[in-house]
Image (cartoon, helix red, strand yellow):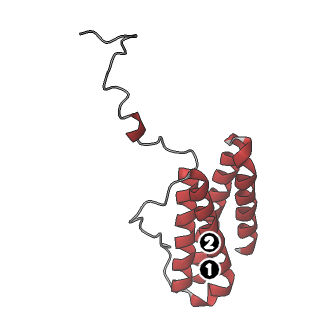
Amino acid sequence: MALGGAAVPLTGCDLFDGDKPKPPDPLEPLAAESADLAGRYRAAVAAASALADRLTPIADAHQAHADELRRVIGRPAPSGTPAASPTVAATDPDGLLAELRQAEQQARTNAAKACAAAPAERAALLGSIAAARATHLEALK
């Protein structure tokens, strides 16, 4: 017995489209970089506690940026991400600051590029992050 109405072909191609992983968000590298910077600053504080008053607020700012970027992306941070640590000897605060300045300069450049390439709804956040990173550079002088 034939069914009435139009026949709809059934294929398996579209059945699981909802299970496809989302493509990477362009903000993923910036979120990872922010988390990495927060870890670097915390490691520097652990290595040279005399720098704590100066570096802890910057570490907190980078962590807040990472958290907000993850919220905008809509994905949690990858689990098991190792925390970054400075490579300069723990007894050299000047070396730690120089290393952080170099990382911060690259991060500021990355944030500015991301801001310039971002859609309008993300540009304000990215501009704010780029400005904060420029301010961090001044605090590291």
**Residue 98's mark?**
2
Q: Quadrant of residue 125?
A: bottom right
- x, y percentage for residue 112? 70, 50
Q: Is residue 69 left or right of residue 22?
A: right
Q: Residue at x 54, y 65 (%)?
A: 35
Q: Is residue 52 above or below residue 17?
A: below
In the image, residue 96 sits, relative to residue 7, either above or below, namely below
Q: Secondary structure at mark 2?
A: helix
Query: Could you tell me which residue is drawn at 57 percent across and 51 percent down?
Result: 73
> In this view of the protein, which residue sits in the foreground, 32 or 72?
72
Residue toward you, 126 or 53: 126
Nearest the camera: 26 or 112? Answer: 26
User: In terms of depth relative to the viewer, which is nearer, 19 or 39?
Assistant: 19
Which quadrant is the C terminus positioned in? Answer: bottom right
Q: Residues within 10 Å of mark 2 (few under 14, many from 20)?
A: some
Residue at the (70%, 53%) spot, across then down: 126
Residue 102 in percent (x, y) is at: 61, 64
Tell me the quarter of the picture where residue 61 sits.
Answer: bottom right
Amino acid on which the number 2 mark rests in the picture: Ala
Q: Residue at x 70, y 59 (%)?
A: 129
Marks 1/2 in contact by CB < 8 Å: the verdict is yes
Which percent across, then down, holds residue 18?
A: 42, 38
Between the residue at mark 1 and the residue at mark 2, the CA separation in whole angstroms equals 6 Å
Name the residue that disc number 1 marks: 94
Q: Position of residue 56 (x, y in %)?
A: 63, 80
